[in-house]
Image (cartoon, helix red, strand yellow):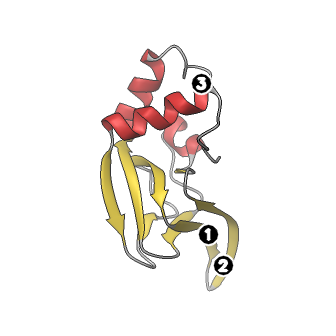
Amino acid sequence: MKFSNTSSPLIQGIRDLFISHGKKIKLGKKEIFAKQGIPLFSVGLVEAGGFKLVYKQGKKEWIKSFIFEGGILGSLPSVFNQIPSTYSILALEPSEVFVLPVSEFKSKLEKKTNTKNF
């Protein structure tokens, strides 16, 4: 999902949530944001840079998708169902991300009326 400056109030609310309550971190090229098979403890909003979402089985690797500026990092099924992530998230280049702990992300979403349907 990508958030642009001309997005709906719902999307703007999610973006504002990350910017006002998140912690900005920097990741270097090839650094891991999330690892396949491990539950996610945080969710991120990409401020700058890019990421690839990768499935791995043995030595084989499949790219699920790419996420760039304005996109959300994290597996929402993993976050909301408290299950391990089915893919890894790796930085393609030096990147900056606003990060929220999963518990805070879920709590804030439940409280904000304009984000409940997210």
Left or right of residue 29, residue 3 in this image = right
Callouts 2 and 1 close, C-beta under 8 Å? yes
Look at discs 1 and 3 and give the one toward the viewer: 3
Looking at the picture, does residue 55 appear above or below residue 67? Answer: below
Instruction: Please tell me how crowded label 2 is: few (under 14), some (14-19), or many (20+) other residues with Cα within 10 Å.
Output: few
User: Is residue 96 something one can see in this rendering?
Assistant: yes
Looking at the picture, does residue 40 appear above or below residue 50? Answer: above
Inspect the image, locate mark 2, and give the three-letter code of the amino acid beneath it: Glu
User: Is residue 118 something one can see in this rendering?
Assistant: no
Looking at the picture, does residue 32 appear above or below residue 96? Answer: below
Inspect the image, locate mark 1, and give the three-letter code of the amino acid beneath it: Val
Choose between 16 and 1: the one closer to the eye: 16
Between the residue at mark 1 and the residue at mark 3, the CA separation in whole angstroms equals 31 Å
Choose between 98 and 101: the one closer to the eye: 98
Q: Quadrant of the C terminus?
A: top right
For image coordinates 62% across by 86% down, the residue present is 59
Q: Circle 1 sits on which residue? A: 54
Instruction: Please tell me how crowded label 1 is: few (under 14), some (14-19), or many (20+) other residues with Cα within 10 Å.
Output: some
Q: Give the image quarter of residue 57.
A: bottom right
For image coordinates 41% across by 56% down, the residue present is 97
Q: Earlier in the sequence, mark 1 or mark 3?
A: 3
Between the residue at mark 2 and the residue at mark 1, the CA separation in whole angstroms equals 7 Å
Q: Residue furthest bottom?
A: 59
Q: Residue furthest front?
A: 6
Determine the secondary structure under disc 1. Answer: strand
For image coordinates 50% across by 52% down, the residue present is 84
Q: Circle 2 sits on which residue? A: 61
Q: Earlier in the sequence, mark 2 or mark 1?
A: 1
Q: Earlier in the sequence, mark 2 or mark 3?
A: 3
